[in-house]
């Protein structure tokens, strides 16, 4: 007989929506306490985030880097590796892109843009090579290493810009502007929605397809669900770790590169604003429960919050802090679920000899 | 706060409290109905047992046994029906806590422990004797020790609980329940994880507990055990009671007929064939990794094509580690493993698989399937891992699904291809695993406890398939705690004790006493295979 009842679809949906509803409730309390009508404020948010085509395009544009970092983070989570280092990849990838796009002259703009993005992706991936190797060779906790490397990346890029690549200091230190022809043109005028948006959307869809239909995707899923079983039938835990962490870094680099080419047109220290594209990607992955549709909805929600937040502040006399309250509440939930998922994983690995002897599984097999 | 102190005292003086226990014992389930989705699992089942009664509940996988006892323990809620414990009615939808307070204690098939806590802390968890909020460890230890001694168990109380083997975890569960003064003990297939000797020890414990006035309800597939110990038997089939038999009238053939409709016979052994050595271990040793596993010491073992070699031993004497070394899941510190005459020490599990090695793991939920993945992916996993038919990284989905459908059909697993594997019962998961591993036409098969927790018909199926593989020339290593199973399957048996192979025998040529001596390390090197 069946001892397991698959959670009914509505129940699962509700679990995903739960954090969102609580965040909105907390926001409503804050609003009501400051004498505003939550209903009309939320209505204003909705209108500003999705009321017109240009506003929707803005939301999509704001969601674009989060989609990329969300997928990059979810890949690692799905394989059971808690890679939280995409923030660092965003920084080093963005700087690499800005450097190529500013220095490479005498070739068509499209070539510059492509070369710049390519280097950004490569550098973003390379940034996480060390923690990935430490994880597979010595079983060193990837959460600690990737998290710490984020601060290294922010400090390192800051140093490089200040001492080797400074153009001007307006507010923050900046690199020279990129070649004009390499700038990505907005698809909707007045917004920063560029070709990056459709690319990010395609990557989310490809992620869903990858997990279902590709050999590596099934490997990633099975290693994530049950590493002992996966190893026993011949999947490689080591390859999954390397693949998902490096691909995550590459997507972080791509996110940073797209921001440089389509939004800021240079690299500015501290450009990945609070709470940071990489960190938001963690929240997107956790709240989206690593499913492609969940990632899409979560990224659009965060994108909507930030695209509407500024306008709402201007027109609705609502402090931007409210937007931060909503984001912060969601991040707390994401944090809780992250820790719970990690505990489950650790409990599962305690039974696995692979947890103690990471070198047991050798080579990739095929 | 729970009355833990009083309880622990009560346990210590259980003899004196026997009448009190007797008053709280006994239960009655009246017309219990339960449906899961489209599946009507229970159809008005009524079942009652008196204080001091040992009641056996038998039936095939899927007959509704586990659901019924989970309802009694408050872990599932019945759709309709009434529950009475110790003469008092429980509420319509009792919580686990209500059932526990009424005296019901469930020993699940796979006993869980809280990792990171000691054995003693696991026993006392939630009922620690305390004064002013400070846990009195000494008192807890004395109380637990008293319970354990009465049951004839010995524990290292300060050891980490996760280091306990399955049999030990079950004993720990008994101590926990008696600590809490359970008057109705419900055991879900208690003997599946035990060796013959352990089963006998368990039975004498059950008899003691019943004589104290407790009611014991146990689920089993093994009809021989029913005859040995049960006062009354209830037979479930398809969610209904199809038979109630009192001790005097127990007839195994009749019970088997009631359970499945036809009488099962064990497969007979074929004449041994001899051929080349397919699997050879020379001087294999391992180190312990500090997780309660047992190091192996200089294991020498050979299995030829067309031969089934059994590995007997008390659970936790190195059988699991031996299987892991062969499969490449555990690295040996010394010695080597050869498949078909080639050393495979440096090969990954995948590469060993590619050389014709297959395995039926002992813990099928942990090692045999990915519970979240659909059935077809679980069947196809080795083929996907080996990259069969993969083009540009894309799996041949339609072909894999068709093949999975056939494998599942052959193995008698009922369930849609897209059903997640964890929705299957344990017996069906085992059928899936066996079907998958044998479909690969392996040259060498390592099977650990291949029929543990499987119903009679499933056992017959798995044994028949193993013997067919043997006839087809496969070299098979079977580790099992069930000596009858080894007798039915193996051409010869080696016995493991404390990480060593301490002897061997050919089934039928060594009696139970001799085997028992080898397994407990008392008759070393008596009869080497």
Image (cartoon, rainbow, N blue to C red):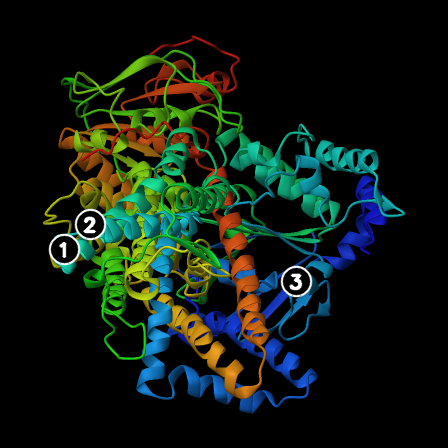
Say if mark 2 contacts mark 1, CB within 8 Å. yes
Q: Nearer the viewer, residue A236 or B453?
A: A236
Q: In the rendered structure, find residue A50 and report the number of the disc placed on it.
A: none
The residue indicated by pointer 2 is: A104
Question: Can you tell which mark lies on residue A111?
Answer: 1
Label 2: how many Cα within 10 Å (few below 14, some 14–19, many 20+): some
Eye-nearest disc, 3 or 1: 1
Disc 3 to disc 1, C-alpha distance:
80 Å
Q: Nearer the viewer, residue B174 or A82?
A: A82
Chain assignment, label 1: A
**In the picture, residue B37 is in which quadrant?**
bottom left
Q: Are marks 3 and 1 on the same chain?
A: no
Which residue is the extreme one toward the top?
B525
Residue at x 46% of width, y 18% of height:
B287
Residue B343 position in % (x across, y down) = 22, 17
Q: What is the chain letter for disc 2?
A: A
Above or below: residue B146 compared with residue B326: below
Residue at numbered disc 3: B27
Callouts 3 and 2 in the same chain: no
- Give the secondary structure at mark 1: helix
- Relative image position of residue B496 (x, y in whole percent): 43, 19
- Is disc 1 on the same chain as disc 2? yes
- The secondary structure type at the circle numbered 2 is loop
The crowd level at tag 3 (other Cα within 10 Å; few <14, some 14-19, many 20+) is many
């Amino acid at each position: 007989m069946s001892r397991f009842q698959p959670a009914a679809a509505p129940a699962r949906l509700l679990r995903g929506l739960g954090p969102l509803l609580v965040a909105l409730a907390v926001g409503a309390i804050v609003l009501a306490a400051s004498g505003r009508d939550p209903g009309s404020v939320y209505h204003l948010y909705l209108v500003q985030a999705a009321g017109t085509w240009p506003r929707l395009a803005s939301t999509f544009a704001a969601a674009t880097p989060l989609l990329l970092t969300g997928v990059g983070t979810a890949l690692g989570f799905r394989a059971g590796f808690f890679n939280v280092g995409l923030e660092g990849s965003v920084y080093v990838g963005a700087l690499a892109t800005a450097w190529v796009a500013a220095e490479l002259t005498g070739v068509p703009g499209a070539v510059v843009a492509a070369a710049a993005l390519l280097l950004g992706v490569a550098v973003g991936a390379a940034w996480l090579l060390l923690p990935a190797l430490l994880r597979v060779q010595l079983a060193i906790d990837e959460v600690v290493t990737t998290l710490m490397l984020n601060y290294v990346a922010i400090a390192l890029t800051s140093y490089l810009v200040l001492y080797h690549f400074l153009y001007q200091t307006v507010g923050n230190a900046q690199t020279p502007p990129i070649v004009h022809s390499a700038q990505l043109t907005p698809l909707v005028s007045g917004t920063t929605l560029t070709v990056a948006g459709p690319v990010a959307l395609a990557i989310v869809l490809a992620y869903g397809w990858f997990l279902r239909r590709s050999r590596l995707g099934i490997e990633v899923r099975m290693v994530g669900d049950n590493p002992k079983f996966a190893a026993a039938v011949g999947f490689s835990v080591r390859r999954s770790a390397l693949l998902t962490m490096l691909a995550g870094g590459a997507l972080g680099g791509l996110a940073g590169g797209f921001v440089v080419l389509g939004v800021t047109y240079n690299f500015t220290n501290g450009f990945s604003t609070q709470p940071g594209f990489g960190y938001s990607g963690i929240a997107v992955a956790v709240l989206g429960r690593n499913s492609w549709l969940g990632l899409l909805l979560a990224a659009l929600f965060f994108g909507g919050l930030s695209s509407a937040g500024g306008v709402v502040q201007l027109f609705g006399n609502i402090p931007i802090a409210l937007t931060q309250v909503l984001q912060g509440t969601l991040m707390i939930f994401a944090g809780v679920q992250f820790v719970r998922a990690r505990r489950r994983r650790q409990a599962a690995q305690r039974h696995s000899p692979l947890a103690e002897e990471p070198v047991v599984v050798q080579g990739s097999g095929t | 706060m729970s009355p833990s102190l009083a309880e622990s005292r009560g346990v210590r003086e259980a003899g004196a409290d026997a009448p009190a226990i007797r008053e709280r014992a006994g239960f009655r389930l009246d017309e219990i109905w339960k449906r899961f989705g489209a599946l009507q699992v229970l159809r008005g089942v009524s079942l009652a047992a008196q204080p001091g009664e040992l009641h056996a509940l038998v039936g095939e996988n899927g007959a509704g046994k586990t659901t019924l006892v989970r309802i009694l323990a408050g872990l599932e809620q019945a759709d309709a029906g009434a529950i009475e414990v110790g003469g008092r009615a429980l509420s319509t939808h009792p919580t686990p806590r209500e059932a526990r307070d009424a005296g019901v204690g469930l020993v699940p098939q796979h006993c869980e422990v809280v990792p990171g806590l000691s054995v003693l802390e696991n026993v006392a968890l939630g009922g620690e004797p305390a004064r002013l909020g400070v846990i009195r460890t000494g008192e807890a230890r004395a109380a637990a020790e008293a319970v354990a001694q009465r049951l004839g168990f010995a524990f290292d109380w300060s050891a980490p609980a996760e280091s306990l083997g399955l049999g030990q975890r079950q004993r720990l569960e008994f101590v926990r329940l008696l600590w809490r003064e359970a008057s109705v003990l419900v055991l879900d297939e208690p003997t599946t994880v035990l060796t013959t000797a352990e089963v006998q020890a368990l039975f004498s414990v059950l008899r003691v507990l019943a004589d104290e006035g407790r009611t014991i309800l146990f689920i089993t597939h093994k009809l021989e055990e029913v005859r040995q110990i049960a006062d009354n038997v209830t037979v479930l089939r398809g969610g209904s009671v199809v038979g109630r038999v009192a001790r005097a009238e127990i007839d195994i053939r009749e019970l088997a007929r009631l359970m499945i409709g036809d009488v099962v016979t064990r497969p007979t052994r074929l004449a041994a064939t001899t051929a080349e050595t397919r699997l050879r271990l020379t001087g294999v040793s391992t180190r312990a990794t500090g997780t309660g596993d047992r190091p192996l010491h200089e294991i020498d073992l050979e299995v030829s094509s067309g031969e089934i070699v059994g590995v007997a031993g008390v659970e936790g004497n190195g059988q699991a580690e031996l299987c892991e070394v062969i499969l490449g899941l555990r690295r040996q510190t010394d010695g080597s493993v050869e498949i078909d005459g080639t050393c495979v020490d440096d090969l990954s599990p995948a590469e060993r698989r590619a050389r014709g090695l297959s395995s039926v793991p002992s813990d099928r939920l942990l090692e045999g399937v990915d519970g979240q993945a659909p059935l077809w992916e679980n069947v196809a996993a080795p083929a996907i891992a080996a990259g069969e038919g993969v083009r540009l990284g894309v799996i041949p989905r339609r072909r894999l699904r068709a093949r999975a459908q056939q494998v599942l059909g052959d193995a008698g697993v009922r369930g849609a291809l897209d059903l997640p594997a964890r929705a299957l019962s344990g017996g069906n998961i085992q059928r899936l695993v066996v079907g998958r591993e044998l479909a690969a036409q392996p040259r060498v098969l390592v099977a650990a406890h291949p029929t543990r927790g499987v119903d009679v018909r499933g056992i017959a199926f798995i044994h028949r398939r193993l013997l067919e593989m043997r006839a087809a020339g496969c070299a098979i290593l079977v580790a099992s705690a069930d000596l009858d199973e080894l007798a039915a399957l193996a051409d010869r048996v080696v016995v493991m004790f404390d990480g060593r192979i301490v002897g061997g025998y050919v089934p039928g040529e060594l009696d139970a006493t001799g085997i028992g001596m080898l397994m407990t390390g008392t008759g070393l090197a008596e009869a080497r295979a």
